[in-house]
Amino acid sequence: MTEPRKRQIGMNRFFARKSGAAKERRDGEAPDLRNSDTEGSSKDVATGDVKNKDRSSWFKRLKDGLSKSSSALGRGISELFVKRRLDETALQELEDLLIRADLGLDTALRVVNAIGKGRYDRKVDPQEVRAVLAEEVEKVLEPVATPLEIVSERKPHVILVVGVNGSGKTTTIAKLAAKFRADGKAVTLAAGDTFRAAAVEQLRIWAERTGAAIVARKTGADAAGLVFDALREAKAAGSDVLLIDTAGRLQNRAELMAELEKIVRVIKKIDENAPHSVLLVLDATTGQNALSQVETFGQKVGVTGLVMTKLDGTARGGILVAISARYRLPVHFIGVGESVEDLEPFQAREFARVIAGIEE
Ligand SMILES: Nc1nc2c(ncn2[C@@H]2O[C@H](COP(=O)(O)OP(=O)(O)O)[C@@H](O)[C@H]2O)c(=O)[nH]1
Ligand SMILES: [Mg+2]
């Protein structure tokens, strides 16, 4: 088979970058705060369950959201394999296409190998290629698609949310708060991004809407000090979950990491096992750069799981596959829009089929 060739991954892409095509905004809508009967289970899974009847509408949103990624791949595959016998050149072109779709070299080669097997010199149907692509992508994603487990006895289960500026941390916290509240959990939010007044305000509004408690200080306050107080207050109040927002931009990356490490240290003064979850929020539109974010945050603050946002309106959804293949970190949730219902537990098969452009 073809040897893995070195090439400049991520360069020379022909897919559109972020479209900026704003989806319909449903921000004003209050989240659904139904209580569900989760009593008795000490280990809850934050499925934030959309009920079955909502599942199809979620699938449609996922499909719409990922349409740029899937149509770029789908179209590319159709063009490659229409009226053509499978040969070395076709496989090479497929490999290039998959790499341009940000799937990563490992996965691209897996797919190319799988397609090549037993099909040389015969005509292959684009639909067959898409099916193999979906299958191989699912194999990569299956082991990482893991629900976020909240252990009720922890009171609170401490979730530190990290990521670069604008990746979607505060929005994701709001969405998670709404899900936990809908599960009947008591939630406290810590407004740890003390650099931007707007970030605190944003969180305050969401606390109000979801019925979560919030601990906030004025702009410029020491973030670690605030987090310390928030954990104490969440404990005193008997909260099930403490969600900690953090700043994504400081003067430089070293300073940002030092601040996060300090936050982790003060948390451990109160509870040496906390934070129980460290969620890294990644913006899908940043493409290959997300890989280095996983690396840096992982080394410094011990990321336990990922959330990928903004999978709507980007042709770069494939990056989640590359990240999964390389780091094998749990992927808990994906975001495909700005409103509160646009965050869902990550499901390998669903994502793989959508990205491969397979119609349900
Ligand atoms: N289209 C889209 N926008 C999102 C998504 N998640 C967050 N955003 C938007 O991205 C911007 C930055 O989000 P924010 O939560 O403030 O990022 P933070 O700086 O990491 O806290 C906001 O305009 C959000 O509405 C998503 O899944 N899809
Ligand atoms: Mg923020």
Image (spheres, rainbow, N blue to C red):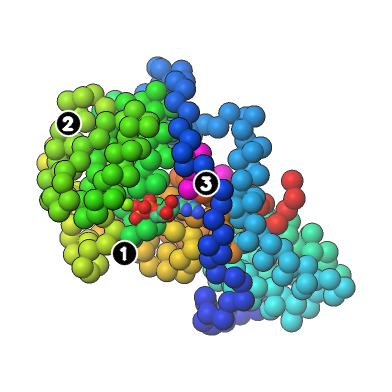
Mark 2 falls on what kind of element?
Answer: helix
Give the image location of residue 110, x and y in percent. Answer: 62, 65
In reply to whether residue 342 is colored magenta, the answer given is yes
Up/down of 35 relative to 148, above or below: above
The residue tagged 1 is 296
Q: Nearer the viewer, mark 1 or mark 2?
A: 2
Q: Does any atom of ligand 1 lie closer than 8 Å to the CB of label 3?
A: no
Give the residue type at disc 1: Thr
Q: Nearer the viewer, mark 3 or mark 2?
A: 3
Q: Residues within 10 Å of mark 3 (few under 14, many from 20)?
A: few
Residue at the location (34% across, 28% down)? 211
Sequence-wise, which precedes: disc 1 or disc 2?
A: 2
Sequence-wise, which precedes: disc 3 or disc 2?
A: 3
Give the residue type at disc 3: Arg
Which quadrant holds residue 183? top left
Query: Is residue 241 something one can see in this rendering?
Result: no
Up/down of 148 relative to 63, above or below: above
Give the image location of residue 240, x and y in percent. Answer: 30, 28
The residue tagged 2 is 233
Q: Which mark is residue 25?
A: 3
In reply to whether residue 306 is colored magenta, the answer given is no
Task: Report the magenta stretch's main SS.
Answer: loop
